[in-house]
Image (cartoon, rainbow, N blue to C red):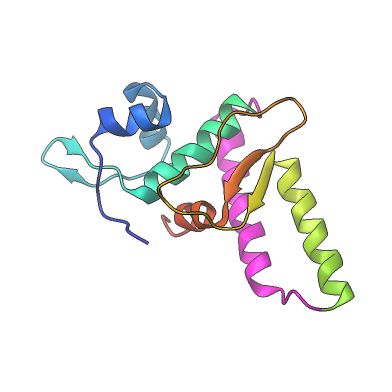
Amino acid sequence: MQNRGLYIISVAAGILEMHPQTLRKYERAGFIEPPRSGAIRLYSESDIARLRLIKHFVENMGLNIPGVRLALRLTERLVDLIDHIPARGPVNQRVLREIEGMFGDLGLRVQPNQSASSPPNNERDSNESFQVFRDEVIRFITHR
């Protein structure tokens, strides 16, 4: 996974379909810390993945800044749990289904990894969860 700065703010904002001021707001809130080259912010793939989740929590779940902070923490903890539970055994399968349900409560559906060149489809209908691909969740977790 590549974590170096890749995109200036206008490009990152365009990728995310957000206003550059919104990215600055999330930086002030402490959600991201893009490195700078002089006065220019450089957004990494990790920053983009994290911002995509933040956008989902704000636009699709209706969360405010403290709510997003909590949702990000919960998502981190759920991913950590999944990584420590072997997939075999009836008890483990039940626990994994429960964790999937918790992701669902956050409006997320974690899918198997996909290529980095094809980002998740952010459009959803009323019965569909926001698709997050495992690499994206891991990218935002490793941002810490």
Identify the image quadrant of residue 91: bottom right
Residue 24 in view in this figure: no
Is residue 62 shown in magenta?
A: yes
Asked if residue 139 lies left or right of residue 93, the reply is left
Q: Is residue 73 magenta?
A: yes
Question: At which x and y percent is residue 7?
Answer: 25, 40
Residue 141 in sight in this render: yes
| Residue found at x 47% / y 52% | 140
Pick the residue in front: 100 or 133. 133
Q: From the viewer's perspective, is residue 41 above or below residue 2?
A: above
Q: Is residue 130 above or below residue 117?
A: above
Identify which residue is drawn at 77% across, 30% down.
Answer: 127
Which residue is drawn at the image coordinates 59% and 50% (left, top)? 73
Using the image as rendered, state which of residue 64 and residue 99 is in the foreground. 99
In the picture, the quarter occupied by the N terminus is bottom left
Dominant secondary structure of the magenta stretch?
helix
- Residue 102 location, x and y as percent? 76, 50
Q: Position of residue 113 (x, y in %)?
A: 55, 57
Question: Considering depth in this image, is 28 or 5 the residue closer to the camera?
Answer: 5
Which residue extends farthest right? 90
Outermost residue on the left side: it is 38
Closer to us: 17 or 55: 17
| In the image: residue 122, left or right of residue 25 | right
Tell me which segment is drawn in magenta. Answer: 61-88
Rendered-image quadrant of the C terminus: bottom left
